[in-house]
Image (spheres, grey):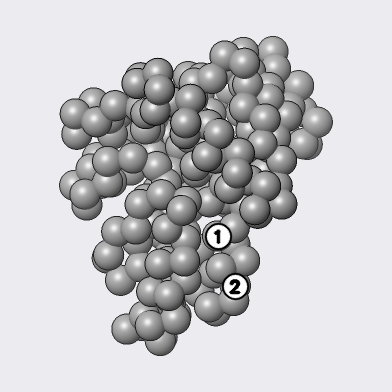
Amino acid sequence: MQKFVECFFDVGSPAAYLAWTQLPRIAAEAGAKLIWRPMLLGGVFKATGNLSPVTVAAKGRWLMHDLARWAERYGVAFQPPANFPINTLALMRGAVGIQIRQPHDLARYLAAVFEGIFARGLALDDPAVVAQVLGDAGFDTATFLALTGDPQVKQALVANTEEAVARGVFGAPSMFVDDVLHFGQDRLDFVAAALRDSSHA
């Protein structure tokens, strides 16, 4: 049977960005299907009582240095925006909307947004910057704005976030293989091992 890995994510998470750079390869090597599950990290934090690591100054400084080391190991760019963390509500509604309405465009959308935020350091909570980045990636800004205001899209993001919390998610990225939660981009080796040993194989 087909093996699966689900990844619950928010594009505002630098760890989710690093996981995004690696998961497609890991899934392909395992012959597994990668399912992206957009959620709102702020909603997860609120529901679980968790807080972003950057709320603790010393931990936040350490974390950003650590993520930079991981990026160097992966051979990917890492340049968070100066105003990190950013509000990703519109971007995550966009991710859900594109996944529902234009699923073939999701990979292109995630590439534009993740790289815009964490490889180019762009403030993608600024609508003008979002319009520029998405336009450069071939997306129509008016269509994107319509998606972010669509009640079905808004509800789908809420539903994804509630499902994530119900399944034990407390942060991003959170990956499931055989309903076992693997949290954090530094646990990708566990994801790869779980896919190798998956009961769905």
Q: Residue at x 41, y 49 (%)?
A: 184
Q: Residue at x 50, y 63 (%)?
A: 34
Q: Residue at x 19, y 34 (%)?
A: 48
The answer to whether residue 58 is seen in the rendering is yes
Disc 1 to disc 2, C-alpha distance: 8 Å
Q: Quadrant of residue 89?
A: top left
Q: Is residue 145 above or below residue 166?
A: above
Q: Is residue 75 above or below residue 79?
A: below
SS class, disc 2: helix
Q: Front-most of 189 and 167? A: 189
Viewed as shown, does residue 159 lie left or right of 103?
Answer: left
CB of mark 1 within 8 Å of CB of mark 2? no
Give the labeled residue for mark 2. 28
- In primary-sequence order, the first of circles 1 and 2 is 1
Q: Is residue 179 above or below residue 50?
A: below
Viewed as shown, does residue 9 lie left or right of 159?
Answer: right
Give the labeled residue for mark 1. 23
The answer to whether residue 155 is seen in the rendering is no
Label 2 CA crowd tier, 10 Å (few <14, some 14–19, many 20+): few
Q: Front-most of 153 and 182? A: 182
Instruction: Identify which amino acid the numbered label 2 is placed on.
Output: Ala
- Residue 9 x/y as whole percent: 44, 43
Q: Front-most of 26 and 7? A: 26
- Residue 174 x/y as whole percent: 37, 50
Q: Residue at x 54, y 40 (%)?
A: 67
Viewed as shown, does residue 40 lie left or right of 101?
Answer: left
Q: Quadrant of residue 153?
A: top left
The numbered mark at residue 136 is: none
- Residue 79 x/y as whole percent: 67, 30
Locate the N terminus and report the quarter of the image it occupies. Answer: bottom left
Q: Is residue 142 above or below residue 172?
A: above
